[in-house]
Image (spheres, grey):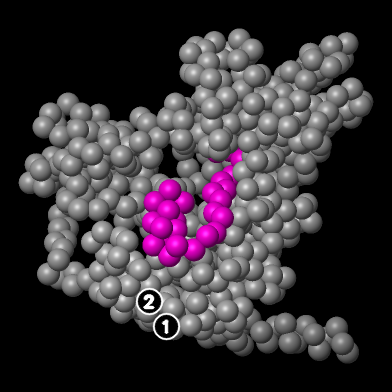
Amino acid sequence: MQEQMEHIFNQGGLLSQHIESYAPRQLQLEMANAIQQTLANGTVLIAEAGTGTGKTYAYLAPAILSGQKVFISTGTKNLQDQLFNKDLPKLRKALATPFRAALLKGRSNYLCHYRLAMAQHDPLQKPYYVVLQELSEWSGKTKSGDLSESNMLEDNSPLWPKVTSTIDNCLSQECPNHAECLINEARKKAQEADIVVINHHLLMSDMALKTSGQGEILPSADAYIIDEAHQLPEIATQFLGNRISSHQIIELCRDSIREMEQDADDMGTIRNYAEKAEASMRALRLSIGDKEQRTPWLHLFDKIDVKNKLSSVIECMDDLEQQLELAAERGKGLEQCHTRCVELIDTLSLFAQKQADDTMILWVDIRTNGLILHATPHEVNQYFQQWMDEKPTAWVFTSATLTVAGKFNNFNNQLGIKQAEMKIWPSPFDFEKQSLLYMPQIPVEPKHEDYNQHIIELAKQVITHSKGRTFLLFTSYRAMHIVADALDEELDDYPLMVQGSASKLSLLEQFRDHGNAVLLGTNSFWEGVDVRGEALSCVIIDKIPFASPGDPVLQARIDALKEWVAILFHPSKYLLPLFNLNKVLVG
């Protein structure tokens, strides 16, 4: 087996012969051997591979040659596209080994023919008539249906939810366009493929569905390779909790009216109750205030107005649910609206109290155009370990950042991994000689209103010195747009690109082609972006993206940790009262 990897990765090997500028690396060969062994034995490997190790080829080559069905999960859709469109084709040519590969994303990435037709006949979407017509023409040509390939919709376009489906509003087999469903086609290809490239959100969505007993998204596999694995605990936390947004409720109300008009136009009471439910949701949003923030639910729950407004939303949703139940037999759309309404009421009910239970953290994400209520689990390790136990297959977790002080304890504990082989391959780069780190002294805190102005002035100087060739990465869209507007007026010598102005794929292609461009982006450009050569020579970061100590989930976990520390160091204060109480109860 080892000889097979050497034939691929050594000097004069298959990769050297077929990939221009390929440089053999001993660490890459060692990693490939370890992964090949893991896949063959069906065991678990946790591998930290520093920047420049070449971990992508180190796991792709063994996966392809294993002859197994392997899911490769990445942290971002950018990296997904890079793996599928660039790395796998190169290896297919170099290895001369036949295999079938598929790219699978979440349903919100695929055009829905039924929703597109609805949007084209919706008077509210008249301003987007031209784009909708272009999408309609594209829908007859595309093989994948992946909207990122169309380059017609910006990231923040309001048309995205109008022309894609959700698990809530998908009509499934009752859909008139079911035979040409692009999501079904993508899943069919994934079912038939040997190598399937997915992302962590899709993987965790599948896990959440299976945990709740609601089915599954992904077919079974022989092995799972998790790249950018350091992101997995946080993403798992998002999917294993419950959440409900004001947008979901408003969308349900409007879908209920639309389906009523189509299949039960004699039941005008549905319109009345749907409009009341939407109004009550808007009233709840107003009662919470204008300040954008993430805050514990109990901070808002004690406000009488908020409590009353939430009760009003639940009452209006109950009334709507009763009407939808009566109309459900009239059509599949109405039946589905009724199911959605019941599920939304169940989730809303979690927030009719201060705290659901000791295992969940209730908090709210307040935004300008709505709010999202979250019930997040304190820990996900037991859920994830159970899920792994139910999949007795090979697992490879890899990233450049998995250890703390050289140990994997934190990562293992977060996911409940108890038995695994653990390896570290450090970066081959000499960062002291090959890079320059500049940390400017900014006289104000990041929350200060003048902070972005300082970023603007520093960025102009650095970009001029670097002759463009720069990424500016931000932790918020607001800061990105403030800096973008200022630089647009003053940087005439370098092409300026901003996330959201075109698809990520298009922006990256333009950036590479120009060779002296400046690109501003948020989280989706922080990882999984490949720009080789000098086109990207400088990266400016406005803030290190650590979670705020005031984040409600982080704060709840800190509080829980403090309680354990208090018990550990002061057992008599916390445990003796429980012991004495137990003596009294037992007699």
Task: Provide the residue designation for mark 2.
Answer: 7
Please provide the residue range marked out in magenta. 84-109
Residue 573, image x, y percentages: 61, 83
Q: Is residue 514 left or right of residue 544?
A: left
Q: What SS does tag 1 mark?
A: helix
Task: Provide the residue designation for mark 1.
Answer: 3
Tell me if residue 123 is in the magenta stretch. no
Q: Is residue 465 left or right of residue 66?
A: left
Q: Image quarter for residue 418?
A: bottom right
Residue 355, image x, y percentages: 68, 54
Residue pictured at 57% horizontal, 79% vertical: 40
The correct choice, above or below, for 397 with respect to 147 in the image is: below
Q: Is residue 297 left or right of residue 150?
A: right
Residue 209, image x, y percentages: 71, 54
| Structural crowding at the residue carrying mark 1, measured as other residues with C-alpha within 10 Å and reported as few (<14), some (14–19) or many (≥20) | few
Residue pictured at 74% horizontal, 32% vertical: 178
| Structural crowding at the residue carrying mark 2, measured as other residues with C-alpha within 10 Å and reported as few (<14), some (14–19) or many (≥20) | few
Q: Image quarter for residue 228?
A: bottom left
| Disc 2 residue type (three-letter) | His
Q: Are marks 2 and 1 in contact (CB under 8 Å)?
A: yes
